Image (cartoon, rainbow, N blue to C red):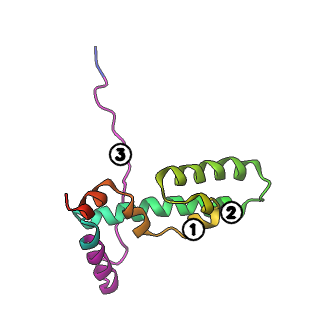
Amino acid sequence: MPTNAQHRNYRKTYKTPRRPFEKERLDAELKLVGEYGLRCKREIWRCQYALAKLRKAARTLLTLDPKDPKRIFEGAALLRRMSRYGLLGEDELELDFVLQLTTQKLLERRLQTKGFKQGL
C-alpha cells in the first residue's frame, strides 16, 4: 500500500532582483548581510518577498470601504499577526503602519539575528 511520506510545498519563498548588477542595491545588500549576520543574499530576498506579500495584503484591504466586513475581519487578522510577530507595537495597530514596515525591522526579529547580535 503506497504511503504519503513526504508532502512538499513547491512554492518559491524568495524573488530574485530584476536587475542583477545594480551597484546601489548590491552595496545595500552587502551591508545588510554584514549587519545581521546573514548566510547569503537569498535570506534578504526572502524577507523582502515576505514583506511584499504583507504590504500587498494591506494595500488591497486599504482600498476597501472601512465598514466592509472583509476589511474588518482580514485587517484585524493581519494586524494581530503583525503584533504576534513583534513587528508592530500596541500603538501601531493600523493598516497604514503595515505599509511602513522595512526589511530591517523584519530582519531584527529573526532568532539568528538575536544570536548574532549577542555574539553566540
Vertical order, 113 against 19 (above or below)? above
Is disc 2 placed on a helix, strand or loop?
A: helix
Q: Residue at x 37, y 42 (%)?
A: 9
Rate crowding at label 1 as few (under 14), some (14 to 19) or many (20 or more) other CA atoms within 10 Å: some
Q: Name which of mark 3 and mark 2 comes first in the sequence.
A: 3
Instruction: Name the quadrant containing residue 15.
Output: bottom left
The answer to whether mark 1 and mark 2 are in CB contact below 8 A is yes
| Image x and y of residue 29, in percent | 30, 75
Rate crowding at label 3 as few (under 14), some (14 to 19) or many (20 or more) other CA atoms within 10 Å: few
Look at the image and give the residue range highlighted in magenta: 4-33
Q: Name which of mark 1 and mark 3 comes first in the sequence.
A: 3
Tag shown at residue 10: 3
User: Can you identify the residue that label 1 sits on?
Assistant: 99
Cα separation, mark 1 vs mark 3, equals 28 Å
Left or right of residue 68, residue 111 in this image: left
| Amino acid type indicated by mark 3 | Tyr
Q: Main secondary structure of the magenta part?
A: loop
Left or right of residue 91, residue 101 in this image: left
Magenta run includes residue 17: yes
User: Can you identify the residue that label 2 sits on?
Assistant: 62
| Amino acid type indicated by mark 2 | Leu
| Image x and y of residue 110, in percent | 35, 57
| Image x and y of residue 47, in percent | 39, 62
Vertical order, 98 against 6 (above or below)? below
In this view, which residue lies farthest toward the right? 67
